[in-house]
Image (spheres, coloured by chain):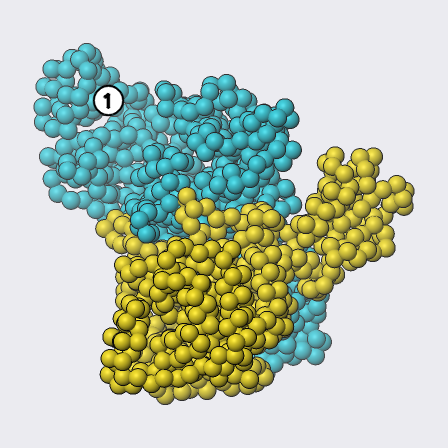
Chain colours: A cyan, B yellow
Amino acid sequence: MQPIETIRHSLSHVMAEAVVKLYPGTKVAIGPAIDDGFYYDFQLPSPIREDDFPAIEKEMLRIIASGAEFKRLEVGKSEAKAMFAAEPFKLELIDGLEDGTISVYEQGEFRDLCRGPHVASTRELRPDSFKLRAVAGAYWRGDEKRPMLTRIYAYAFATKAELEAHLKMLEEAEKRDNRRLGKELDLFSTHEEAGPGLIYWHPKGGRFRVSLENWWRDEHYKNGYEILFTPHIGKSWLWETSGHLGFYKEGMYSPMKVDEDDYYVKPMNCPFHIMIYNSGVHSYRDLPLRWAELGTVYRYERAGSLHGLMRVRGFTQDDAHIICTPEQIEDEILEVLRFSLHMHKTLGFKDIKAYLATRPAGDGAVGEPAKWAEAMASLKKAIDKEGLAYELDEGGGAFYGPKIDLKVKDAIGREWQLTTIQFDFNEPERFDMTYVDSDGQKKRPYMVHRALLGSIERFFGVYLEHTAGAFPVWLAPVQAAVIPVGPDFADYAKSVADILRREGVRVDAMLSDERMNAKIRLAQGQKVPYMLVVGAKERDEGTASVRMRDGRQMEPMKPEAFVAYLKDKVDQKALDI
Amino acid sequence: MQPIETIRHSLSHVMAEAVVKLYPGTKVAIGPAIDDGFYYDFQLPSPIREDDFPAIEKEMLRIIASGAEFKRLEVGKSEAKAMFAAEPFKLELIDGLEDGTISVYEQGEFRDLCRGPHVASTRELRPDSFKLRAVAGAYWRGDEKRPMLTRIYAYAFATKAELEAHLKMLEEAEKRDNRRLGKELDLFSTHEEAGPGLIYWHPKGGRFRVSLENWWRDEHYKNGYEILFTPHIGKSWLWETSGHLGFYKEGMYSPMKVDEDDYYVKPMNCPFHIMIYNSGVHSYRDLPLRWAELGTVYRYERAGSLHGLMRVRGFTQDDAHIICTPEQIEDEILEVLRFSLHMHKTLGFKDIKAYLATRPAGDGAVGEPAKWAEAMASLKKAIDKEGLAYELDEGGGAFYGPKIDLKVKDAIGREWQLTTIQFDFNEPERFDMTYVDSDGQKKRPYMVHRALLGSIERFFGVYLEHTAGAFPVWLAPVQAAVIPVGPDFADYAKSVADILRREGVRVDAMLSDERMNAKIRLAQGQKVPYMLVVGAKERDEGTASVRMRDGRQMEPMKPEAFVAYLKDKVDQKALDI
């Protein structure tokens, strides 16, 4: 079987052939393979809509069934120009090519300027493994001053089963969309008129966040971290010294004047932590320092790229800086990695993969090559020691140091980057950070930036989509709903809810005059883990019947027993209910 | 006895007489009574320093002993001008007076333009109850374009005992100064170069803050609040709608541009909470809402007025908004007051006084007078119900509603405002906030702003000065230090520290090669509540001797028993150790 990229690319030619045939006068632009299929950009004589997809797909099936051969032709530049004389976009592409041989692929009645490779015949393409997806506008060459073309996207996989799995995943993803669940579960909102990309945490979102952050702080203290709090604004001196005004300005907002000085809202926390470090003298005996902060930063993102909780303009990094001696770095990196995995596993992520990025090519990178090599060695050693699967991204490191990113796989198979662990050879120099070593000499410490969850906002989005809003008990905004079977039992329901509330359970007493079944549906829809239903029998026995959000039912139990059961789940950070 | 203001004012004339006599050619300006004494502004022929105070005080004592009478003269404007022909500042003041009788006071060889009243004779002034304090520059009439004068400050009280108590308090306050303790205990720093008035919380300050905030959040949840998180920046639309750009602009920083819009760093949290309220429909059944946030706000303060933790440019309000029906307001106000007192008492403040501020005069205030009256009634009723001492500040309310402030007295008798509870008749109108009442009609809810501790930063300063850094165990950054009597016992000390740490005690294992006594002094200086000292006896018995930071000593106990003792103190939020 051909590589999937080859299949996708060949299908894009087939789609182009179909479109040109069905819409005479169409001019073709480009049609690459992408992650889950392919697209092709056209200049069409008349607009098309998704309604037109069946006709296009039908024509594609005909072409596939015809068993047309993919033929590679090699031509000179002038020959190519003659061949594509009626295709202005192709002519422009040809003009941009170096002199020499140009390859063209031909199948059936369609020819395309193309580097290849392709399948040998359209018969190799499976008629049941692709599906046209969407139509969108796209500027020629991504330039908004050039013509707006029509892009047709399609999904394409190696097998029908893979296509179906992908479509099912997308359908599932649609249901789990964080924007949709955020509204349905009343967790958060954004407000275009007050500034897009800024998250407002509603009471129930707030409860999730408080539970998550409490755990995060506890774990950090237990694992040898200290927690700092630093300002959200800093004078230009700080950002000039750190270098952010040099290399990160496009991510920062414009300055505000305070007295005669320019202040910037922080895009990162690091310079503030360094100010604290530099306010004292440090001995090698005081190192390593592990300084963490839930620091809210603001970064510019194009309005069009903002997306629910996933891409925002203000977010709270679960940030930390490790400052240590060169001798300590290997243990520290291993420790950060171990701690990250511990956190992700507690949250229920099992499938975790590392991405290791090395020194970028060219002169842009700071720090001696020996330091990079040493840092890379400690990153690799840590990955090996934890037995983690990893991919190498040669040259993909930041200019200031190498890094490991960790991606977790969610419940429907999507990968999300959460953790990043980054060496920084830049700021310790710029801020002249030092420690006094055992020989009495001032030396430069190593500094590592790390965020485990990435940001609280984006993590909330990922976790919302991962769990479809059915959070584990310890993170659930409402842990139990108490529902009387009818109005006569409202008093008893209230007394049960009071017992739970006194014990610190996040409980919703549903005492309105709606019907019981409506309340149960509502609580289930809100993904409340447990519903305590009470009627005559329960009142007489001093118990409650417990339904679970997944439909299971527990034996009736006394409220105190339920509290003990629930506390146990919370203490264990149980993932099941 | 004369009112203390009269005594202070008379002493200021006596000081002026002494200065004019000792420094011929001196021109006199003004000399009022102030909170703890008086000052007088002079134009001196040559600079003076605090070294010169004894001579001035000696001359003042001579004048007092002389028993000179304070005589009131009443003169016309031209007579007054002739009388003060050699005193340019007095001439300017006379020019500013309306025509008619002008009063002049005379004692001994000194005459002053003065409204009085004064004591009858210098003999009424106690020679042991005042003390010259400081010399400072002050512009004539506070105008930096006018001459710089020399201001001499003095303390003055009714009795020697009161003066001494005040001086002792000041000495004590000096030792407790939050900037000094902040440095000594390594709790926080500020950094002029990165922006003055912005607090950087160091690890030990961070531990205090985390403990305080955890408690604050727990108590809020227990008391029916929800916790929100909102952005630190908002588009101009938000601040125009709220009215802040109209009535609060001087407290806000200049805007930053994002795309084409102006964004402001928030000086208050309220508009964000209102956006969340307005993102849903609310029934009277859903009210009251109690929405709290530890929201960090930024406000402009003159650089010269910034002062440690007490006056800053960025601070975290422990803010909340109560949104309720008119029928609920009385209970809600009472509840807020009760909750505030509960919080302050937990923190150890016993002496708490209320300050009630009513509708300002004129047309500036918003909201119907009937609403103001109703709001005032509920504030007063709540104060009465809690049996709180209070003062009335007629016309001292904000334009948007009446308020109660609560001030607590600290360990050395100073009053600090912490709590504020403010009605807001402005924003619910501006944002058109509504709820659906039982009659199906849309109605306007009441909104109350409240902060209990005021701000986390300023509260930290107050509490630091109140406790002199000797925090109760539950808030202490380090709860116990473990100190071996010598290097042979370091291993055992470490094992004791490990037991404590595992149990969540914030412990400092002092294992360096310094001497035991130096470590004990260090731990005491750091106000660590307990020092566990271990030597041969303790190691053999598996115990530790416990010294307390106040010098007391406990019987040796097993580490587990100490953990239980300490946890009990923490759970009780005990104020003693």
The amino acid marked with disc number 1 is Cys
Residue at horizontal 39%, vertical 38%? Answer: A163
**Location of residue B517 (image quadrant):** top right
Q: Is residue B96 above or below residue A217?
A: below
Q: Chain of mark 1?
A: A
Q: Which residue is mark 1?
A: A114
Residue at horizontal 51%, vertical 67%? Answer: B59
Q: Position of residue A226 (x, y in %)?
A: 59, 45
Is there any visible trace of residue B352 in the rendered image?
no
Q: Position of residue B383 (x, y in %)?
A: 53, 82
Please state, as top left, top right, bottom left or bottom right, where the C terminus of chain A lies in the image.
Answer: bottom right
Please state, as top left, top right, bottom left or bottom right, where the N terminus of chain A lies in the image.
Answer: top left
**Disc count in the image?**
1
**Location of residue A80 (image quadrant):** top left
Residue at horizontal 20%, vertical 12%? Answer: A101
Is there any visible trace of residue B189 in the rendered image?
yes
Q: Position of residue B361 (x, y in %)?
A: 33, 82
Q: Secondary structure at mark 1?
A: loop
Q: Position of residue A325 (x, y in %)?
A: 58, 29
Horizontal relation, residue B111 to residue B390: left or right: left
**Location of residue A126 (image quadrant):** top left
